[in-house]
Amino acid sequence: MKVYVESCLNCPPDKVWDEVQKSSLFVEILYPLTNFVSISAETFPMKWVEGEVVKCKPILFGIIPTLGSHTIFFERVDQGWREIQTREKNALSHRWDHLIRVRTLPHRQTLYSDEIEIEAGLLTILVWSLANWFYRHRQRRWKIVAQRLVAE
């Protein structure tokens, strides 16, 4: 099943693209629903790099550890198209393919989108429902980040 969520951000696309590549943004936009703790390295890298594999432990609401780990493979970080394609998996999903796109809109605005393909066997509909809610939260948080970026 596929989740698709997009938002118009009142921020120039260059700033959005620069920020989306940072692991600090990943942590910020997940707050307070989930905190991801790196288990493949001491900390997350400053910027996501094509070909990199990151293993982390999701902690719900900062206090509830989840089963197993979450693995993120950065298959593509495309500077020209402003896209990041990851292949992810965790205890519930054997396929969690995430495509992030940053597109230019008129008036120095940005169209930001998350597209996720999910396969989780019998749990797919449940995982898909949670992912819909989760990515809508992420984009609400992105709008807050975009306001901060414009103010800086």
Image (cartoon, rainbow, N blue to C red):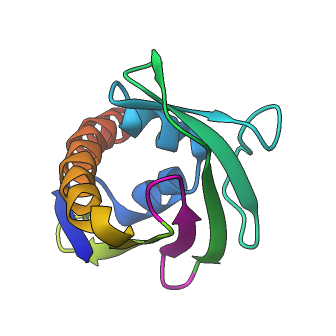
Residue appearing at x 32%, y 75% in the figure:
103
Percent across and percent down for residue 150 are 32, 41
Question: How many numbered marks does the figure carry?
Answer: 0
Quadrant showing the C terminus: top left
Q: In which quarter of the image is residue 32?
A: top left
Asked if residue 41 lies left or right of residue 80, the reply is: right
Asked if residue 37 lies left or right of residue 33, the reply is: right
Percent across and percent down for residue 137 are 22, 42
10 versus 117 height, above or below: above
Residue appearing at x 71%, y 53% in the figure:
54
73 versus 75 height, above or below: above
The magenta stretch is: 80-93
- Residue at the extreme top: 63
Is 99 covered by the magenta stretch?
Answer: no
Q: Nearer the viewer, residue 114 or 116?
A: 116
Is 90 covered by the magenta stretch?
Answer: yes
Percent across and percent down for residue 9 are 22, 55
Residue appearing at x 59%, y 48% in the figure:
22
Quadrant showing the N terminus: bottom left
**Is residue 113 in sight in this rendering?**
no
Q: Which of 107 and 91 is in front in this view?
A: 91
Q: Which of 28 and 149 is in front in this view?
A: 28
37 versus 15 height, above or below: above
- Residue at the extreme right: 41
Residue appearing at x 60%, y 44% in the figure:
23
Percent across and percent down for residue 135 are 27, 53
**Is residue 37 in sight in this rendering?**
yes
Q: Which of 147 and 120 is in front in this view?
A: 120
Q: In which quarter of the image is residue 122?
A: bottom left
